[in-house]
Amino acid sequence: HANDRAEVIIFDTSGSMGAGRKMQAAKEAAAAAVDSLDDGVAFAVIAGDHEAKLLWPQDGRSFAVADAGDRASAKAAIARAEPAGGTAIGTWLDLARQLFQTTAAPARHAILLTDGRNEHQQPHELAAAVSACRGLFQCDCRGVGVDWEVEEMRGIATALLGTVDIVADPADLAADFRAMISSSQSRALPDVHLRLWAPQGAVLESLRQVAPEVLDLTDTGVASGPLAKDFLLGGWAPGESRDYHLR
């Protein structure tokens, strides 16, 4: 059901987005994402520079609802965004977390788009923000252009069970955002865990997802019994399969 899902669209509006067509492309992508939401899905749009701003809704609600009125208002707010300021991605994630903490929707997904490095925060501040979000929502990350910090983005996406990719040509962003929304809406099981039982005396050396993406899950397990650990896998679509390697 649409009301089982909440979506947050986060896009970089820092000063460096003003170069080339990046800002215009980011706005088009965010608007395309809003248009792609199924009717009734809870959604919010965040603009990020050295702080996070809730672009829509702006009337005291944490989430808008995907209908004609809220879609039009969100797209108008997106269109007004101007590139300025620095980059503090942790503050963007903090605001998304605060929003997601207000919803009972079991399927919670975010898209994060940036063109740069987390210049206005210490690495430990970003790490703390990511850690606080883990398990609350899934986040797909996209870097636009060529200046962004690959490992930083990969760290966010891996911790938040999402994909990471570079979109070198800003013109391809809108299609990519539509695809991410479509993928998140097809996940019928929002919160899948893998439970591993190991006999006494055995040591888990590594657990990795090896397909479709490579993810190291080794350090993410939470004890669920004397010899068992649970590993969060996030949302799955019907008929989906993934491969794991355990040592």
Image (spheres, rainbow, N blue to C red):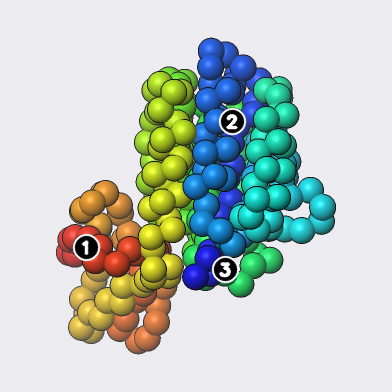
Q: Nearer the viewer, mark 1 or mark 3?
A: 3
Residue pushed farthest front? 68
- In percent of width and height, residue 116 lies at 53, 26
Residue pushed farthest right? 59
Q: Is the C-beta separation of discs 1 and 3 under 8 Å?
A: no
The residue carrying mark 2 is 27
Q: Give the left or right position of residue 212, taking residue 79 as reference.
A: left
The amino acid type, in three-letter code, at marker 1 is: Ser
Q: Give the left or right position of residue 109, taking residue 217 as reference.
A: right
- In percent of width and height, residue 150 lies at 41, 32
- In percent of width and height, residue 36 lies at 50, 47
Can residue 198 be seen here? The reply is yes
Image vertical order of residue 202 relative to residue 152, above or below: below
Q: Earlier in the sequence, mark 1 or mark 2?
A: 2
Label 3, secondary structure: give it: helix
**Circle number at residue 192:** none
Q: Indicate the quadrant containing the C terminus: top left, top right, bottom left or bottom right.
A: bottom left
Image vertical order of residue 196 relative to residue 237, above or below: below
The amino acid type, in three-letter code, at marker 3 is: Asn
